[in-house]
């Protein structure tokens, strides 16, 4: 009981310190927001160009929770370069009202690039769900698969397919071996059987393997890093055994692609991961579909 009281007091003290320092220290503000997500939602529609040349890609980076600032900037630059090189139209916004029944059909795919903290309201959730299930494409990167989305059961269980339970800490970032399971998928064809990647490794309450419409593209080899969360008196085993880090889902007539990778800016600097993301856009947007591409 004494240990429990000390733990509660420590957490309460931490909350007070973060609340006091959040107003002037960016990182403290970020941690405070992660612990106390905003409930601010956009209602005014964003201004879109009169013409969005096909194919148009929407990148959404709103964060009502923890903000991966450097990763968002680095990934956005990669998407912009990719779009310019491929002749795609890219529209970036942090306005959740873009998830609208009239706006979404103007895009081939939507990328939630480290979007966190329940960034859209109930009406916007419904619009996105209906659009995806009607054939839209969706890509969720890193924080788009974390527990800040737990208030939307359809998104967490039916779309992502698993609940985030923690990430490596102590150390937070570790190199590990990723094993490619589906080299035939468009997002994975440029890869070999394995590649080494340094990441803040996410763990989930279950593997999506065997779930309806799920396709495992890559897993992380847990024997090549320490899947533990160590903080103060906590030492938690995050091992999953079967540990997917890149996978797809088939929600209705739509296509959904998820990657647990992408916490740091460095994650987006390598040709391997850039190729994964480019292939994910091609696949979810159905660009150059082959006869047997399916979901």
Image (cartoon, helix red, strand yellow):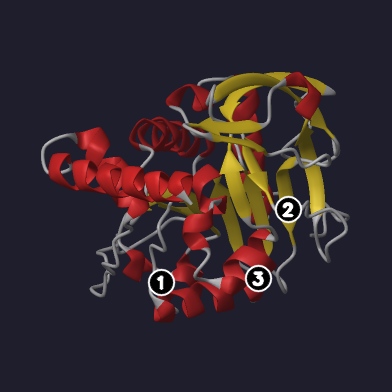
SS for tag 1?
Answer: loop
Q: Which residue is tagged 2?
A: 248
Q: Nearer the viewer, residue 7 or 97?
A: 7
Looking at the image, residue 65 lies above or below residue 69: below
Callout count = 3
SS for tag 3?
Answer: loop
Q: Nearer the viewer, residue 21 or 126?
A: 21
User: Can residue 103 be seen at all in this image of the molecule?
Assistant: yes
Q: Residues within 10 Å of mark 3 (few under 14, many from 20)?
A: many
The answer to whether residue 140 is left or right of residue 42 is right
Look at 42% across and 33% down and name the residue there. 71
Question: Could you tell which of marks 2 and 3 lies nearer the N-terminus?
Answer: 3
The answer to whether residue 245 is left or right of residue 202 is right
Where is residue 136? Give x, y as percent. 60, 66
Name the quadrant containing residue 260.
Answer: top right
Q: Residues within 10 Å of mark 1 (few under 14, many from 20)?
A: some
Look at 16% across and 34% down and name the residue there. 25
The answer to whether residue 272 is left or right of residue 30 is right
Looking at the image, residue 287 lies above or below residue 137: above
Look at 53% across and 37% down and name the residue there. 86
Q: Which residue is tagged 3?
A: 135
Residue contact between numbered discs 1 and 3, judged by CB atoms under 8 Å: no
Where is residue 85? Give x, y as percent. 49, 32
Q: Which residue is tagged 1?
A: 103
Q: Residues within 10 Å of mark 2 (few under 14, many from 20)?
A: many
SS for tag 2?
Answer: strand
């Amino acid at each position: 009981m004494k240990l429990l009281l000390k733990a509660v007091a420590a957490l309460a003290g931490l909350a007070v310190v973060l609340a006091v320092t959040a107003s002037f220290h960016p990182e403290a503000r970020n941690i405070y927001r992660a612990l106390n997500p905003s409930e601010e939602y956009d209602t005014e529609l964003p201004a879109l160009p009169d013409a969005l040349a096909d194919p148009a890609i929407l990148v959404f980076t709103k964060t009502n929770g923890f903000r991966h600032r450097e990763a968002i900037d680095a990934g956005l630059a990669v998407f912009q370069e990719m779009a310019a090189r491929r002749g795609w139209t890219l529209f970036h916004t942090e306005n959740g009202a873009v998830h609208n029944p009239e706006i979404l059909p103007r895009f081939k795919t939507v990328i939630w690039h480290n979007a966190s903290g329940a960034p859209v309201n109930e009406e916007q959730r419904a619009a996105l769900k209906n659009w995806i299930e009607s054939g839209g494409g969706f890509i969720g990167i890193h924080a788009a698969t974390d527990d800040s989305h737990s208030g939307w059961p359809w998104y967490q269980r039916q779309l992502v397919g698993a609940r985030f339970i923690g990430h490596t800490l102590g150390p937070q970032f570790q190199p590990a071996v990723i094993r490619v399971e589906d080299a035939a998928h468009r997002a994975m064809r440029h890869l070999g059987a394995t590649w080494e990647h340094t990441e803040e490794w996410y763990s989930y309450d279950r593997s999506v393997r065997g779930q309806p419409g799920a396709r495992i593209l890559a897993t992380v080899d847990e024997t090549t890093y320490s899947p533990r969360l160590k903080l103060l008196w906590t030492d938690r085993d995050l091992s999953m055994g079967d540990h997917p880090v890149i996978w797809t889902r088939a929600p209705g007539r739509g296509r959904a692609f998820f990657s647990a990778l992408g916490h740091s800016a460095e994650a987006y600097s390598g040709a391997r991961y850039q190729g994964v993301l480019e292939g994910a856009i091609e696949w979810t947007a159905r660009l150059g579909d082959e006869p047997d591409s399916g979901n």
